[in-house]
Image (tube, rainbow, N blue to C red):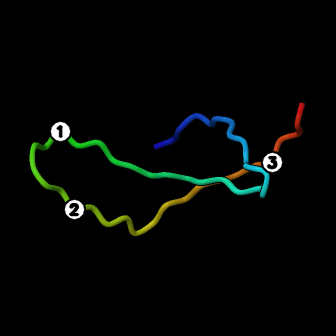
Amino acid sequence: MEYEGFEAQTDENGELWLIVGTDSGFEGATSLYYTSIEAVLTPIEAE
């Protein structure tokens, strides 16, 4: 599955938080364990 990119800005320390979540239609407790997550971060020039 391929997703479109988006722009994000780091804080004054150059830090960026990446939060991963899952939406489920199941009406009950669900436990998920991610075994792999990949993010490609590409710096862009400030305007």
Q: Alpha carbon of mark 2 to alpha carbon of mark 1: how far? A: 13 Å
Q: Can you say which quadrant of the picture contains the C terminus?
A: top right
Q: Amino acid at mark 3?
A: Pro
| Number of residues whose C-alpha sits closer than 10 Å to that of mark 1, classed few (under 14), some (14–19) or many (20 or more) | few
| Number of residues whose C-alpha sits closer than 10 Å to that of mark 2, classed few (under 14), some (14–19) or many (20 or more) | few
Q: Amino acid at mark 1?
A: Gly
Q: Alpha carbon of mark 1 to alpha carbon of mark 3: how far? A: 36 Å
Q: Residue furthest top?
A: 47
Residue that badge 2 annotates: 31
Residue that badge 3 annotates: 43
- What element does badge 3 sit on? loop
Q: Position of residue 36 (x, y in %)?
A: 45, 66
| Residue nearest the observer in this picture, 40 or 13 | 13
Q: Earlier in the sequence, mark 2 or mark 1?
A: 1
| Residue nearest the observer in this picture, 8 or 38 | 8
Q: Amino acid at mark 2?
A: Ser
Q: Position of residue 13 (x, y in %)?
A: 78, 58
Residue that badge 1 annotates: 25
Q: Position of residue 11 (x, y in %)?
A: 73, 49
Do tag 1 and tag 3 residues touch (Cβ < 8 Å)? no
Do tag 2 and tag 1 residues touch (Cβ < 8 Å)? no
